[in-house]
């Protein structure tokens, strides 16, 4: 999933009726445009653009968009991600939610559907979002091929076009760090708003021990832009443990570990987090 460069004409509201007819593997509904102003005013981040893009022109933005499209249209890359098992933290989240009788899950930056398909196979009512059309189409195709149901929407990672306190679990795996720290903080606040009291948030992102840390130029502390990445000049923010704990101050952190990527021989270190919204929390704090 690419970062929120600009709002791509995706509307602010989605069908949240939960009817069977609206949640099929080939579902093509997307948020409509009637409540764009409402989303922009209530999310606190949907209308913002990362400050680290200030010196990037439209050509660089097109490079990023084209880069993500090419990545998800590459059969080998799509196959690799489709066949990877879910993160253990996502499995743990599913187990906990299942035991608590909670059913609604959101997969932000779903890609080709690695976690969307897993959660759907567990019987969750899944909504998946990605702002790369190629990823959205691939996820829908993979759901249909597997005989599974989920609602797949084209939306920015700064957009969660659903009521507050709507979701029981949210997954953001290798997605929301693709921005500057101010926008990242806003996304985490937005996720907190959309989680029901006691809901779970699974977050995976690279750590400063990652092999790609310090590649390119540093546009703010911990945020690097590498012009040579295949997806284009995309910012990557590398959180420290202290920063993670600060960003998740409104959550209860149930687990926080720095792990090596199981699928790479290189030093691709990542943070894996399971955090819970306080049972006393509300959708608008």
Image: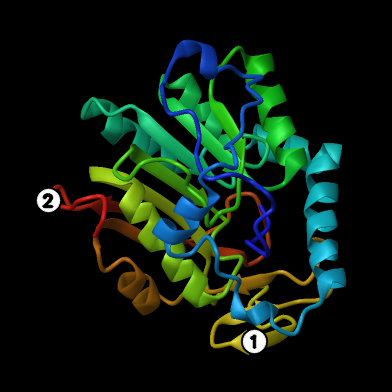
Q: Quadrant of residue 28?
A: top right
Residue 171 on image: x %, y %: 45, 45
Residue 176 on image: x %, y %: 54, 60
Q: Quadrant of residue 51?
A: bottom right
Residue 46 vs residue 85, the one in the foreground: 46
Q: Residues within 10 Å of mark 1 (few under 14, many from 20)?
A: some
Which residue is drawn at the image coordinates 23% and 25% (left, top)? 101
Which residue is drawn at the image coordinates 69% and 82% (left, top)? 54
- SS for callout 1: strand
Quarter of the figure with the C terminus: bottom left
211 left or right of 60 in image = left
Q: Residue furthest left?
A: 280
Residue 135 on image: x %, y %: 71, 40
Q: Quadrant of residue 246?
A: bottom left
Residue 3 appears anywhere in the view: yes
Residue 61 vs residue 172, the one in the foreground: 61
**Which residue carries the number 1 mark?**
219
Q: Residues within 10 Å of mark 2 (few under 14, many from 20)?
A: few
Residue 148 vs residue 60, the one in the foreground: 60
- SS for callout 2: loop
Mark positioned earlier in the residue sequence (2 or 1): 1
Residue 59 on image: x %, y %: 87, 70
Q: Is residue 71 above or below residue 124?
A: below
Residue 85 appears anywhere in the view: no
Q: CA distance from mark 2 to mark 1?
A: 38 Å
**Which residue carries the number 2 mark?**
280
258 left or right of 32 in image = left
Which residue is drawn at the image coordinates 34% and 61% (left, top)? 256
């Amino acid at each position: 999933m690419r970062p929120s460069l600009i709002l791509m004409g995706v509307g602010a509201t989605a069908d949240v009726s939960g009817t069977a007819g609206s949640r099929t593997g080939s579902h093509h509904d997307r948020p409509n445009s009637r409540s764009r102003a409402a989303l922009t005013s209530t999310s606190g981040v949907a209308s913002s653009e990362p400050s680290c893009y200030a010196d990037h022109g439209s050509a660089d933005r097109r490079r990023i968009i084209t880069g993500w499209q090419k990545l998800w249209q590459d059969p080998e890359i799509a196959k690799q991600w489709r066949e990877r098992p879910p993160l253990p933290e996502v499995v743990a989240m599913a187990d906990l939610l299942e035991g608590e009788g909670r059913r609604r899950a959101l997969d932000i930056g779903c890609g080709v559907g690695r976690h969307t398909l897993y959660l759907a196979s567990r019987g969750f009512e899944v909504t998946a979002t990605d702002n790369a059309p190629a990823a959205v189409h691939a996820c829908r195709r993979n759901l249909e091929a597997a005989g599974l149901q989920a609602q797949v929407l084209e939306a920015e990672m700064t957009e969660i076009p659903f009521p507050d306190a709507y979701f029981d679990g949210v997954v953001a795996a290798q997605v929301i760090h693709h921005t500057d720290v101010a926008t990242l903080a806003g996304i985490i606040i937005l996720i907190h708003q959309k989680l029901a009291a006691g809901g779970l948030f699974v977050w995976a992102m690279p750590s400063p021990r990652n092999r790609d840390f310090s590649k390119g130029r540093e546009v703010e502390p911990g945020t690097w832009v590498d012009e040579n990445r295949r997806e284009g000049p995309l910012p990557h923010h590398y959180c420290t443990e202290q920063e993670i704990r600060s960003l998740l101050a409104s959550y209860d952190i149930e687990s926080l570990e720095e792990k090596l990527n199981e699928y790479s021989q290189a030093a691709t270190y990542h943070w894996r987090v399971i955090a819970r919204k306080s049972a006393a929390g509300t959708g608008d704090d």
